[in-house]
Amino acid sequence: MNKELRKAVIAGNWKMNKTRPEAKALIEELKPIAEKATCDVVICVPFTNLETAVELTKGTNIKVGAENVHFEKSGAFTGEISADMLTEIGVEYVIIGHSERRQYFGETDETVNKRTKAALAAGLKPIVCVGELLWERKCDITKEVIARQIKLDLFDVSAEDAKKTIIAYEPVWAIGTGETATSEQAEEVCSFIREQLTEKYSKEVADTITIQYGGSMNPKNAAELLAQPDVDGGLIGGASLKAADFGVLLDAASNG
Ligand code: PGA
């Protein structure tokens, strides 16, 4: 990462894990570990743990995020949660367009774009996920896929709003598989994303946007990934569920 231009952001993505007592225990364990981090620290937790997480992290350097948000303000959308419902309880970040949402719940670039705009309008910081499938990488269309996602997902998002947005590059084949992109592969796509943002906005805007890598980032590979100039942090699944592992990633992002 380039520390002169950007601050690293390490965000945990707990996915569908942790009951409330388990969440409490993990956050209490995390607090003293996160205290010394100089990067931004975010935990994105299931809806049922949001209030607990906001309460327990008050006065600490840990920020809380949700794992999804609906794009309408209110109405007949059974099972959905609006951006205002999140900000009202103190949530600051939200993951949008995670590949699991796209794969299993039919989310499209169009709804990712709507969710991103709704989140920004409510004052949330979106973490917008992009990434190619293994099949797409094999067909050598990774860059086309990413360019298309950036165009569609950020359609009509102003430069000012783009600066508040985090892009997470998560190659779908590396998520939860133990298979990480090499640091060269991660850098190649993250710098390509920055080129796309430069084209869409300007170099000044693109230079301020945090681009994370996600996909089996762990204590062993984090330092090397985070040493890449365009990798400004990580979106962490599995390794965010153990305080000690997450702590190693916070150290790597703080000291790298
Ligand atoms: P993983 O998940 O670290 O378990 O691969 C990352 C993510 O899905 O955000």
Image (cartoon, rainbow, N blue to C red):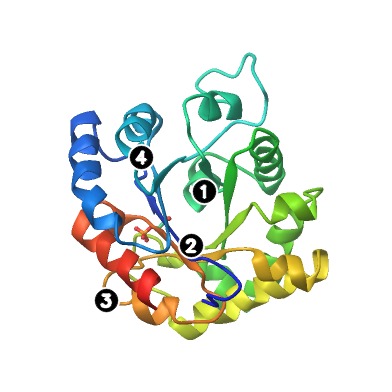
- Picture quadrant where residue 40 is located: bottom left
Q: Is mark 3 within 8 Å of ligand 1?
A: no
Is residue 172 placed above or below 124 in the rendered structure? below
Q: Is residue 30 above or below residue 49?
A: below
Who comes first in sequence, dot 4 or dot 1? 4
How many labels, in total? 4
Quarter of the image for the C terminus: give it: bottom left
Q: Measure the alpha-carbon separation of dots 4 and 2.
A: 35 Å
Q: Residue at x 65, y 38 (%)?
A: 115
Q: Which numbered disc covers residue 59?
A: 4
Disc on res. 103: 1
Q: Which residue is mark 3?
A: 220
Q: Are marks 1 and 3 in contact (CB under 8 Å)?
A: no
Q: Are marks 2 and 3 in contact (CB under 8 Å)?
A: no
The residue tagged with tag 4: helix, strand or loop? loop
Q: For the residue labelled by badge 1, is the local secondary structure a helix, a strand or a loop?
A: helix
Cα separation, mark 3 vs mark 4, equals: 31 Å
